[in-house]
Amino acid sequence: MTRLLIATRNAHKVEEIGAILGESFQFLTLKDFSNAPKVVEDADTFAGNATKKAAELARWLATDDSDFKNKNSKPDFVLADDSGLEVDALNGAPGVLSARFAALDKDENSPDADNNAKLLRLLKTVPAGKRTARFRCVIALVEIDPPPSLRHTQIFDGVCEGKIIFEPRGQNGFGYDPLFVPDGYEQSFAELGEEVKNQLSHRAKALARLEAGLRT
């Protein structure tokens, strides 16, 4: 069984990844590693942030300073993702700043409700036909055991096209899910529910490519 350290403390993200990849993987998160370093996500691309997180944590786990020896099993890989919403009418914003969109001057995530409110405010005068958007996810996977000179990062990406509606709908999901309607559907991600979302989301597509890559 492949053991993955998911480089996040976001419970929603962990649940989503676990539901998509299934029981053939064992999952650990940063909550299992109290001494894990905090990685500053300061790259200007999703791939840059995901790669930085995965590579830095893999290096840390390979040193004597890490605490995996206190765990039942050592991870085989570090999986780090960066994802966000790209709105065409906003020239691709919020993009890599999606999680802290409402308070860009702070180095911390903003509440989902605040991010959604800001997005709706900026799109207030934008008509329905020009509210196209997409969720983008980039996953970086780094094997832990090889020495640093041989360690490399595998990149997997996924995109889900759709549009931004005029008010939140639905009680499921997180982030911008209540405002995003994927192409081919009338319901928002928050209305469709996890089972449907996990078949067509940006993260689902990236994880499908990752799983296929691990099996080759």
Image (cartoon, helix red, strand yellow):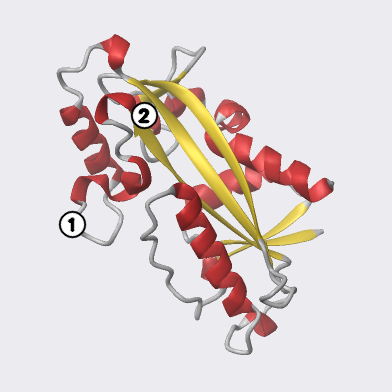
Q: Amino acid at mark 1?
A: Asp
Separation (CA) of disc 1 from disc 2: 25 Å
Q: Is residue 75 visible?
A: yes
Please state which of residues 86 and 21 is positioned toward the viewer in this rendering: 86
Residue 143 location in percent, x, y? Answer: 70, 65
> Which residue is found at the position 44% from the left and 12% from the top?
186
Residue 43 location in percent, x, y? Answer: 39, 57
Q: Amino acid at mark 2?
A: Pro
What residue is pinned by disc 2? 178
Please state which of residues 171 and 2 is positioned toward the viewer in this rendering: 2
How many neighbours does mark 1 have within 10 angstroms: few (below 14), some (14-19), or many (20 or more)? Answer: few
Q: Is residue 10 visible?
A: no
Residue 1 located left or right of residue 132: right
Residue 70 located left or right of residue 129: right
The mark lying in front, picked from 1 and 2, is 1
How many neighbours does mark 2 have within 10 angstroms: few (below 14), some (14-19), or many (20 or more)? Answer: many
Q: Earlier in the sequence, mark 1 or mark 2?
A: 1
Residue farthest toward the bottom in the current orientation of the protein: 64
Residue 29's place in the image compared with 213, above or below, is below
Q: What secondary structure is found at the residue carrying circle 1?
A: loop
Q: Tag count in the figure?
A: 2
Residue 10 located left or right of residue 153: left
> Which residue is found at the position 52% from the left and 68% from the top?
31
Residue farthest toward the front in the current orientation of the protein: 149
Residue farthest toward the right in the current orientation of the protein: 216
Residue 2 location in percent, x, y? Answer: 78, 59
> Which residue is found at the position 42% from the left and 49% from the top?
45
Residue 78's place in the image compared with 181, above or below, is below
Residue 36 located left or right of residue 164: right
What residue is pinned by disc 1? 105
Q: Are marks 1 and 2 in contact (CB under 8 Å)?
A: no
